[in-house]
């Protein structure tokens, strides 16, 4: 399939990604939230390994086609886990384990050619070790040309389930949006530094997804949608991306999720991420306040670059 696409579109596509958000496959096989709805950790870990192997084989096929004007990469989402109580070792250990089980379970094979001892121990202890062939890691860890980072937020972990609801808002400062998610735009800066500091990434980084949902989506009497929280969210993330750029980190692009309200996985039409409102019955669209803000923000960048 990859070879057919490479031959059909070739260098007309400047940036190819083998896989987008591989963890979605794990969620579908281990947690049952996405298709195919399985709830089995062994299936999830095997699916994880297979999708990494598919990535490696996709890179192989891309190199075989010798596309000189195109680049190949992968898109992984980083939701970095923080301990709710940094001074409590159980919370620290839980956050570390969750990081191992999630984004590091992709980044380590891709950039270091292995699963860590911590993840291997977890898989052995929980009888969910995937079948791994001798040459798999070599295929998975082939060099890529760029990295796509999907980043929406962080995750805060607590080993004491009874404290989560009681203490979470207090510990993280109660800085939550109306949709119930924490407003923590520094998450993208931290994710970028995970790539640079932990994985020594030298290839370009693209922020391939970032956005938020359900921010005052009602159409008011003036026919407008005043999604101010979405504007604050995007502005916050762009600020921290700019901080990383100022440090000299090679970030080549930012892709806002999303242009239109869409069918959002298992949430269907209930999660609206777009900066343009979609009437799902009539297909009529209305630009939200965030769309006009984003238009003006981009125009400002272009004017600044022109002046320079």
Image (cartoon, grey):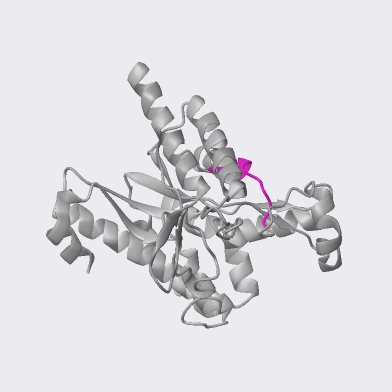
Which of 168/83 is in front? 168
Q: Quadrant of the N terminus?
A: bottom left
Left or right of 108, for residue 185? right
Which of 240/99 is in front? 240
In magenta, the rendered stretch is 181-191
The residue furthest front is 221
Residue 155 appears at what percent x and percent y?
Answer: 66, 55
Residue 153 appears at what percent x and percent y?
Answer: 60, 51
Left or right of 226, for residue 47? left
Residue 115 appears at what percent x and percent y?
Answer: 51, 59
Residue at image coords 45%, 73%: 47
Residue at image coords 38%, 38%: 204
Residue at image coords 44%, 35%: 296
Residue 203 appears at what percent x and percent y?
Answer: 38, 39
Which of 266/33 is in front? 266
Is the residue 244 above or below the residue 256 in the image? Answer: above
């Amino acid at each position: 399939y990859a070879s057919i696409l490479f031959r059909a579109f070739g260098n007309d596509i400047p940036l190819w990604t083998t896989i987008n958000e591989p963890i979605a496959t794990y969620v579908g096989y281990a947690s049952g939230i996405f298709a195919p709805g399985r709830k089995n950790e062994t299936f999830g870990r095997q699916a994880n390994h297979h999708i990494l192997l598919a990535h490696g084989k996709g890179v192989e096929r891309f190199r075989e086609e010798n596309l000189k004007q195109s680049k190949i990469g992968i898109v992984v989402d980083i939701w970095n886990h923080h301990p709710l109580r940094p001074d409590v070792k159980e919370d620290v250990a839980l956050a570390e384990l969750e990081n191992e089980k999630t984004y590091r379970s992709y980044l380590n094979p891709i950039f270091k050619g292995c699963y860590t001892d911590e993840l291997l121990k977890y898989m052995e202890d929980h009888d969910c070790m995937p079948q791994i062939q001798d040459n798999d890691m070599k295929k998975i860890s082939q060099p890529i040309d760029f990295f796509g980072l999907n980043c929406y937020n962080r995750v805060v972990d607590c080993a004491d389930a009874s404290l989560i609801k009681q203490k979470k808002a207090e510990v993280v400062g109660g800085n939550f949006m109306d949709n119930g998610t924490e407003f923590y735009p520094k998450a993208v800066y931290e994710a970028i530094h995970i790539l640079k500091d932990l994985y020594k990434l030298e290839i370009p980084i693209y922020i391939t997804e970032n956005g938020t949902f359900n921010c005052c989506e009602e159409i008011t009497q003036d026919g407008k949608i005043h999604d101010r929280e979405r504007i604050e969210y995007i502005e916050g993330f762009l600020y921290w991306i700019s901080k990383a750029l100022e440090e000299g980190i090679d970030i080549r692009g930012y892709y806002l999720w999303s242009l239109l309200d869409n069918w959002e996985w298992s949430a269907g039409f209930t999660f609206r991420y777009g900066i343009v409102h979609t009437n799902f019955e009539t297909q009529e669209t209305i630009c939200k306040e965030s769309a006009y803000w984003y238009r003006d923000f981009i125009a400002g960048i272009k004017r600044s670059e022109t002046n320079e």
